[in-house]
Amino acid sequence: MALKGSYTGLNQRQCLFVHGRGWLPWMLLALASATMAALLLERTRLAFSAHHLQWAQDLAFFNQILFAASEGRAWTSSLLLEPTGFFQMVHFHPVLALILPFYLLWPGPLTLLYVNVLVVLSGVFPLAALARDRSGSSWFALAAGLAFLSWLPVQTAALADFRPMAFMVPGFLLVLWGLVRPSWLMMFAGALLTCCAREESSYLLVWVGLSVLVLPPGRSRRRHGAALAAVGLTWFLVLLLVKGNLFYHFNPLAFLSGAQQVGLADQALTRDRTRHLALLLLGGGSATLLSPSTLLMCVGPLLYLLATPAKEWQAFTGNYAFYRDVLIPFLAAGAVMGWVFLVERLRWGGKNSRLGVAGAIMLLGNGLAFHGVRSHLRQGSWEQNRQMAASAEVAGIDSLLERVSPDARVATDYRLIAALSGRRVLWNVAHFYMDDARPPWWDAPWPLGLARVDTLVLPLDAPILGRLDDSWRLEAAASGYGLWLRTRPPAGGYPQPLP
């Protein structure tokens, strides 16, 4: 199968349909996208209001990083017991610099959650443009876009806690659109966006570029593939120079051993991942199997996911669900390419009629895929968040949070840490009095202790409360949580804030 443009061979009537009356499908797609965005933004707000985020710890440290940068300080967060700093963090996210201007206008963790929703959903437009250029029909582009918006993996990726990796969804879709059109501008724009998201993009861009060379769709696109692989390789070499801990989490040299140790050796995990992949293909994405070029491109992200030990990327909620973001754009584009491939080889009816049927199947398939999971989420976490946000329990917790001074040195738990983020000193109480060895980069006193904070917001049965002395008093309690304040500074004073 070849990646090829759409306008070659179109008759005058078809060109009029695409260029003259094609505005209506795009308006409908924009309306559908705005509606879905409003729905998911509200669900995100409810999850935040209910203090029921999937992994509030990571949202908190990203908010702390941007909060520090917004004050002109280092891009760091003490919440990570790892190297911190714009270049020193274990993952490199240049895209944070692009988010900072928006954060300056609307500071706070909720802004990052909204960014996550809008970034993931923005992938609908390069996907629809890819579908139009490949099929020659704006109506098929509308169907592809609606199928993308209705796909549960897309919706839950948008609802996940903020991760810069979300930018890989529109980024790789721009890359694929640039290959289909072909367009140097779109391809390089997408490559730049994915490079800014996370360092693993370097490996994946090389894979996508080599995939185009192995299954060349034409001489011009062969040049695109070579250029794309060169971009990925160049970015990898740059990272080797600026990132001393580039292989901290994902080392290509240990790729197979990681897969064997966890991803393939654990039968239960392998079964869950296989089932998830089968469900991905049971929707509109089944036609990806008809597109050898995009199917080959999917292999790279899939191998990366399978070799990510103990990271549950097949889950729809949880702290590792964002890993699947890297596979979404390839399967979404592969479905479009596969259906157009099939339409071009069938001979019944007219092409527009066949495209209409293919678009309806793709939309229906994605809407029904993961039906059981969708029903569970609707009756479980989504409805639960709505009820919790309006509950007396959450109202009590909020009353405690309102009493915390913006200048307070705070320690709290995983549930409330995101809500309390955006201050000079914030710690997760789980990191206090750890028995583990000192982190390799840590040059401050270890272990961490209560001397670093003057405010605690914790459950009333938190084990660390047994360490409180008479310099602490319980200021208020509500909904199973308490607010403790220091009555006098610790002996020797407070340590310098970290960072």
Image: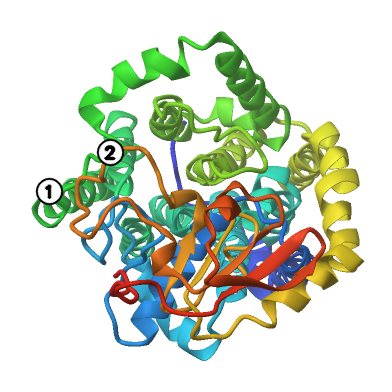
Classify mark 2: helix, strand or loop.
Answer: loop
Dividing the picture into quadrants, the one containing residue 66 is bottom left
Question: Which residue is painted at 49% across and 83% down in the image?
Answer: 102
> In front: 89, or 228?
89
Observer-side mark, 2 or 1, equals 2
Q: Is residue 24 visible?
A: no
Tag 2: amino acid: Ala
> In front: 11, or 113?
113
Q: Would you say 396 lies left or right of 99 here? A: right
Location of mark 2 (residue): 437
Q: Is residue 410 above or below residue 183?
A: below
Q: Would you say 406 lies left or right of 444 here? A: right
> In front: 26, or 307?
307
Which numbered circle lies on residue 140? none
Classify mark 1: helix, strand or loop.
Answer: helix
| Residue 325 on image: x %, y % | 53, 46
Location of mark 1 (residue): 240
Dividing the picture into quadrants, the one containing residue 313 is top right
